[in-house]
Image (cartoon, rainbow, N blue to C red):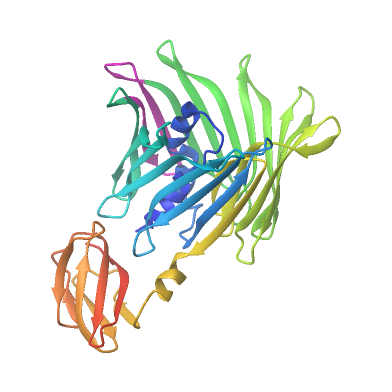
Amino acid sequence: MKKAIFTLAIFVMAFGNVSFAQRKANLKLDATQNVLKHYGLRDESTIVPETAEWQTLEGEQYHTNYTYDEYDYYLLEEFTEYNEGYGWNDVYQISYEYDFAGNVIEMLSMSAIESGVMQNEAKASLTYDGDELSEVVIQYWENGNWVNEEKQVYNYNGDVTTVLYWEWNGSNWSSHELYTYTHGNGSIELLIQYMQGGAWQNDEKHLMTLNFDERITEILVQEWENLSWVNEELTTYNYEGNVFPIKTVQQWNGSAWENDVKFEYAYDGEGNAVNGHCYGFAGDDWGENNGDIEMPFANGEKSNEYYGVNVDVKYIDLTGVNENNTAMLLLVYPQPAQNEVNIKADGFAKAEIYNLAGQKLLESLNETVSVAMLPSGLYIIKVYGRDGGMASQRMTVIR
């Protein structure tokens, strides 16, 4: 089963100095990131952001704090503050809810109004077919009610994945965009089409080149003009081992590529980008510029984005945190479990099993616990020792 914290890592966007309309648009899931995960191009790591500091070229400062649950496993909230030189003020927050299997089922965006109270902005509701994302519904907050805006429907068929976008016309859903991804040998092609006259019309094509590790090294964007594909944008990831210190974006001028934006990164020893800087090309030289700075972590396989000229991110290894918070040695096996689990702990006294909502489901005084009545999903097992110590561990049950 996938780790929900890294499903959501695909979702998280630090919006920075953007309008409400842009934040509302960014709240929805990025289809390409989800499809890459479906194709296995995203691993399951325990490295996640702890804090982020970023600035715009105009000197505006932002700080985001990421809050995880008591078991250091699920991201519960992102909270962002803003400083224009007169002190820190609340800007917005994004909160997350999960289902019994650990999938993100709701993302809620709120912003601070003049009184300092957080007010609803937009909401994404997610539906799954097993572990596969199947539908996303985006709503915005208007006059005290949630109003439909957009729906995404995912369909997986081998190496071809489609994402159909529907828009709400006030009483019904109508299809308006179709994304078709085709995963080939060393490449992924994305065809974007729009509905017109009752038929799908070509709009854009994205050609993604993969290296031997199946990491994207180049994205060529083309537009459909006069019944042919015309170059528009080229993004190049200049890898050195598992990381890319430089990402360059170029624009097509009709006969050649011209430099547009460049991003430079510094990494820690684990391959996490701890600093990102944006440059724009003007005349014949690079200068500082605002842009969407992609900050990769977990060896470049995941990333968050921040709008500005400079970003500093601190990371945390949740496995290490969980182990450091453990007050006694604990081994729970087999993992995943089907009918029962065995517990090895010094001075064992009792065990309790909880769901992710914090409800206690089972309690046992034996070191072998039957889980046959539990549905498939993720649980927390707490083990107490005779000396008063306690240790907790995640536990997966499958059927």
The residue sitting at 79% across, 24% down in the picture is 255
Q: Quadrant of the N terminus?
A: bottom left
x and y, in percent, of residue 131 in the image: 33, 50
Please indicate whether residue 357 sits to the left or right of residue 224 in the image: left
Where on the picture, by quarter, is residue 188?
top right
- From the viewer's perspective, is residue 28 above or below residue 277? above
- Whether residue 222 can be seen here: yes
The residue sitting at 37% across, 77% down in the picture is 326
- From the viewer's perspective, is residue 56 above or below residue 43? above
Residue lying farthest to the front in this orientation: 86
The residue sitting at 67% across, 31% down in the picture is 233
Whether residue 161 is in magenta: the answer is yes
Between residues 99 and 52, which one lies in front from this camera angle?
A: 52
- Whether residue 214 can be seen here: no
Count of numbered marks: 0
The residue sitting at 44% across, 69% down in the picture is 321
Please indicate whether residue 237 sits to the left or right of residue 386 in the image: right
- From the viewer's perspective, is residue 337 above or below residue 96? below
Residue lying farthest to the right in this orientation: 284
Q: Which residues are magenta?
A: 148-174
x and y, in percent, of residue 113 in the image: 41, 32
Between residues 198 and 351, which one lies in front from this camera angle?
A: 351
Please indicate whether residue 293 sits to the left or right of residue 238 in the image: left
